[in-house]
Image (tube, grey):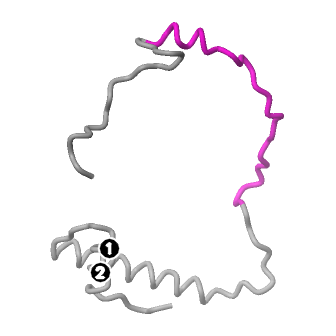
């Protein structure tokens, strides 16, 4: 793994993500990337030979239940509470303005 990341690399990643940083933010994020790389490099130095993989840090076990539908077929009751419905569907105001190009 790389030990350093340059401001130019951070700027390149920001441009790929369509993000704009000023010089102060670029310095801040570059330092954060370097700190993260240092941390990963430190973790890579840990000897994990013979250590069982850990999937959870607690002793809790997920409790599963049978997947059974209850109170099904409540469509009519739901539609009675809807402010507006049409052909069995809840009608809502349009939220997408199609007048602008994507």
Cα distance in 3D space between marks 2 and 1: 6 Å
What's the mark number on residue 54?
A: none
Expressed as whole percent of the image width and height from the top left, the position of residue 6 reads 30, 88
Q: Is residue 68 a member of the stretch shown in magenta?
A: yes
* Residue 54 image point, x, y percent: 74, 67
Residue shown at the point (49%, 9%) measured from the top left? 81
Q: Which residue is mark 2?
A: 12
The residue identified by callout 1 is: 16
Residue 95 in which image quadrant: top left
Left or right: 44, with 34 as reference point: right
The total of numbered circles placed on residues is: 2
| Secondary element type, mark 2 | helix
Q: Is residue 42 left or right of residue 2?
A: right
Q: Is residue 15 above or below residue 75?
A: below
Cβ–Cβ under 8 Å for marks 2 and 1: yes
Q: Residues within 10 Å of mark 1 (few under 14, many from 20)?
A: few
- Look at the numbered disc 1 and give the secondary structure of its residue: helix
Stretch of the chain drawn in magenta: 56-82
Prevailing secondary structure of the magenta residues? loop
Rendering coords of residue 101 (x, y %): 23, 50
Q: Residue at x 45, y 14 (%)?
A: 85
Is 54 on the left or on the right of 6, as rendered?
right
Q: Nearer the viewer, residue 51 or 90?
A: 90
Q: Is residue 29 above or below residue 7?
A: above
Depth check, front residue: 98 or 25: 98
């Amino acid at each position: 793994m790389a030990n350093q990341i340059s401001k130019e690399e951070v700027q390149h990643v920001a441009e790929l993500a369509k993000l704009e940083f000023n010089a102060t933010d670029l310095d801040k994020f570059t330092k954060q990337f370097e700190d993260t790389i240092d941390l990963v490099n430190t973790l890579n130095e840990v000897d994990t030979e013979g250590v069982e993989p850990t999937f959870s840090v607690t002793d809790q076990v997920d409790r599963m239940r049978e997947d059974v539908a209850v109170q099904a077929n409540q469509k009519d009751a739901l539609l009675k509470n809807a402010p507006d419905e049409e052909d069995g569907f809840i009608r809502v105001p349009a939220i997408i303005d199609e007048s602008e190009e994507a």
